[in-house]
Amino acid sequence: MSQLRPAMLVLLLLTLVTGVGYPLLTTGLAQWLFPAQANGSLIDGRGSALIGQNFTRPGYFWGRPSATGDAPYNALASSGSNLAASNPALDKAVAERVAALRAANPLSPQAVPVDLVTASASGLDPAVSPAAAHWQAPRVATARQLPLKTVEDLIDANTERPLLAFSGDPTVNVLRLNLALDALTQP
């Protein structure tokens, strides 16, 4: 019995420190130092810069395919397709995506960028390569009745480059690019 009281006090103290104090401290610091990131990196209340969106209209750029199950870009079901490169189901899915993209983008080159037909590891990737964005530019320019040069300049302006050239590849956040398009004209 003499050991029960100190054990309960230590339990209560650790519960308060690790269960209340630490979370309040880290949340407060995050809100103070990084408010946008702490609140989900939301962009104009339209979506998160960290989670892909399901754009399907011709006047918008499309992101990578989502492998999140029933609903595309469902953050609660983040996962890859888990299909091996040798799996015939993956070959079939990629072939179907290539055919659909070629049909929707008849003015684009035959070679479809790989990131437009393969899902990312999380199935939530918000960005595509600049090559994938430029590949879609003719469709978007036609649908929005904009000069192709205007759309390509917008892609270049929204291309995010890594801080160090060897630390990653340039990307284009699809949501930010589509919002920039909306600022020019409605589809």
Image (spheres, helix red, strand yellow):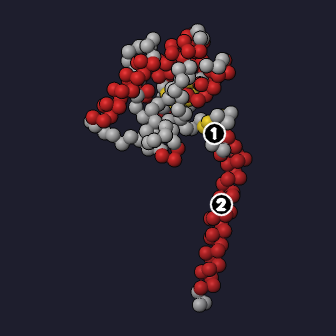
Q: What element carries label 1?
A: loop
Rendered-image quadrant of the C terminus: top right
Disc ID at residue 41: 1
Amino acid tagged 2 = Tyr
Return the residue nearer the eye: 41 or 81: 81
Q: Where is residue 41 in the image (x, y as percent from the top left)?
A: 63, 39
Disc ID at residue 109: none
Q: Is residue 23 left or right of residue 167?
A: right
Dot 1: within a 10 Å radius of its alpha carbon, few (fewer than 14), some, or many (20 or more) residues? some
Q: Which residue is drawn at 66% across and 54% down?
A: 26
Residue 15 visible in the current orientation: yes
Disc ID at residue 22: 2
Residue 166 visible in the current orientation: no
Amino acid tagged 1 = Ser
Return the residue nearer the eye: 47 or 70: 70
Q: Residue at x 65, y 19 (%)?
A: 186
Q: Is residue 178 above or below residue 122?
A: above
Looking at marks 1 and 2 on the same chain, the residue that comes earlier in the sequence is marked by 2
Q: Quadrant of residue 79?
A: top left
- How far apart are labels 1 and 2 at the CA level? 23 Å
Q: In which quarter of the image is residue 69?
A: top left
Q: Position of residue 109 (x, y in %)?
A: 41, 13
Q: Residue at x 62, y 70 (%)?
A: 14
Residue that protrudes farthest toward the bottom in the picture? 1
Q: In this view, does 121 lie above or below 128?
A: below
